Amino acid sequence: WQRNFVTLGYMSHPEHKPSIGELDDGFQTIEPPESSIEWAKTQADQALRDYQLCLGLTQNELRDRKMLDVGAGSVHFAAACNWEEINKEIYSIDPKFDQSRVHPGMGRSDARFMKTLPRAVLAEVKRRMVTSVGEQLPFRDQSFDLVLARSVPYDHDPVKLEARLRELLRVGKEVRVFPVRWSPDGEVPYFNKTIFQDILAKIGKEILFETEFRELPGEESYSIRVLADGT
């Protein structure tokens, strides 16, 4: 997982251990070029590469599918797909969203990103922003062809994790998640696949689906792909 961020340019050296603050800031590490539109485009392009790498996605897999991005944060992914005309039907959900303003939960850099988007892109992204949490998705069963969760914490609250996975499986025909875990000192530990396997096995007694753990570049780094059968 750490090496993925090196590949994407978030860190200057593979031996550098990211702090939580560094990864929370995310795209704020990119220096804006002279043109604000160029800066926004750079961030959007980087988000698209980020999602594709961490969730094992190709551009063809993103086309012509109704998608939900859970924990969408600064909506860079939806903006990128709209901007590149890959897909406009992407719903972004995050508890920080507030439709009365652009995005009050954003940092200054992310708020600037929203404000510098082309009007047509911004309009498409905003009309599909939904304020909610991953454990209570306000959508009907099997509403989406593809549900993405780019950052799924799994080491603090297994009950919450199970509730979130159940909801993702309920609303999506295909689900892809990228697990993240932080140790108290900020080190990035290896992924414990057993935690997800146990929870998915429990859910699998009630819902039929297929699970695939995809190993990504870097040691013990995985995305998890789940295919539901509609039952």
Image (tube, helix red, strand yellow):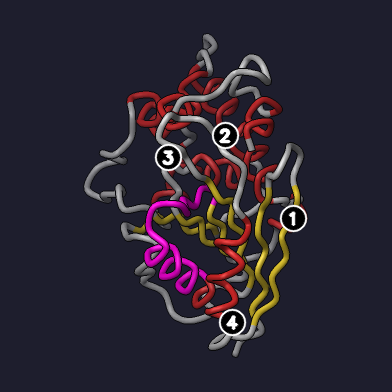
Q: Is residue 113 magenta?
A: no
Where is 167 relative to 219, above or below? Answer: below
Q: Looking at the image, is mark 1 or mark 4 earlier in the sequence?
A: 4
- The local secondary structure at tag 3 comes to loop
Q: Amino acid at mark 4?
A: Gly
Q: In the image, 83: left or right of 36?
A: right
Residue 44: mark? 2
The residue where tag 4 is placed is 204
The residue positioned 32% from the left and 60% from the top of the image is 132
Do the numbered discs 2 and 4 sit on residues whose CB atoms are within 8 Å?
no
Q: Amino acid at mark 3?
A: Ser
| Label 1 sits on residue | 214
Observer-nearest of 224 and 158: 158
- Camera-nearest label, 2 or 4: 4
Going from N to C along the chain, the mark reached first, 2 or 4, is 2
Residue depicted at x 66% and y 45%: 54
Asked whether the residues under the numbered discs 4 and 3 touch, taking CB atoms below 8 Å apart as contact, a structural biologist would say no
Q: Secondary structure at mark 1?
A: strand
Looking at the rendered structure, the secondary structure element under dot 4 is loop
Residue 116 appears in the picture as rendered:
no
Closer to the chain start, of discs 3 and 2, is: 2
